[in-house]
Image (spheres, rainbow, N blue to C red):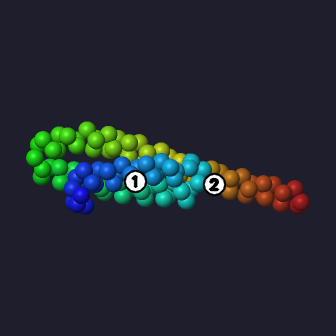
């Protein structure tokens, strides 16, 4: 199978989505970043496959189209989840830092 075949690109995108699912952990920002990278690679594969399918015969394109649409929905949902978890982690860290600063100010004021 050639790299430029739509079926290969779709399968590679599916593999990357499955790998992203296995790697992703909500509380681990590094792994969430890696997951985001895998999902972006999956999107690139899907876009190339879609471009190639547009050039193919209608019969082959119509056979692969449901797979492409399903993967697009899955990738889109996962990207939202990963981005939300990263944003949530960032917000938690900011809140934690703000609370530590308040605590230090309180301690300093109580010593005065």
Could you tell me residue 23's position as x and y percent? Answer: 51, 53
Query: Residue 95 or 81: which is nearer the viewer?
Result: 81
Please tell me the numbered disc located at residue 93.
2
Query: For the residues carrying marks 1 and 2, which lies nearer the camera in this image?
Result: 1
Residue name at image x 18 percent, y 54 percent: 52
Query: Image point 50% across, 46% down: which residue?
Result: 84
In the rendered image, the vertical position of residue 69 relative to residue 7, given as above or below: above
Q: Secondary structure at mark 1?
A: helix
At mark 2, the secondary structure is helix
- Residue 65 numbered tag: none
Q: Can you name the residue that lies furthest to the front here?
A: 1
* Residue 91 in view (yes/no): no
Quadrant of the image containing the N terminus: bottom left
Residue 16: numbered disc = 1
Which quadrant holds residue 61?
A: top left
Looking at the image, residue 40 sits to the left or right of residue 22; the answer is: left
Location of the C terminus (image quadrant): bottom right
C-alpha separation, residue under disc 1 versus residue under disc 2: 29 Å
């Amino acid at each position: 199978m050639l790299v430029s075949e739509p079926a290969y690109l779709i399968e590679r995108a599916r593999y990357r989505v499955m790998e992203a699912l296995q790697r992703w952990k909500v509380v681990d920002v590094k792994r969430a970043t890696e997951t985001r990278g895998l999902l972006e690679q999956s999107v690139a594969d899907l876009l190339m496959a879609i471009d190639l399918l547009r050039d193919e015969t209608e019969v082959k394109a119509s056979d692969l189209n449901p797979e492409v649409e399903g993967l697009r929905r899955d990738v889109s949902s996962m990207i939202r989840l990963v981005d939300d978890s990263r944003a949530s982690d960032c917000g938690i860290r900011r809140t934690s830092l703000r609370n530590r600063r308040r605590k230090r100010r309180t301690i300093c004021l109580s010593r005065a």
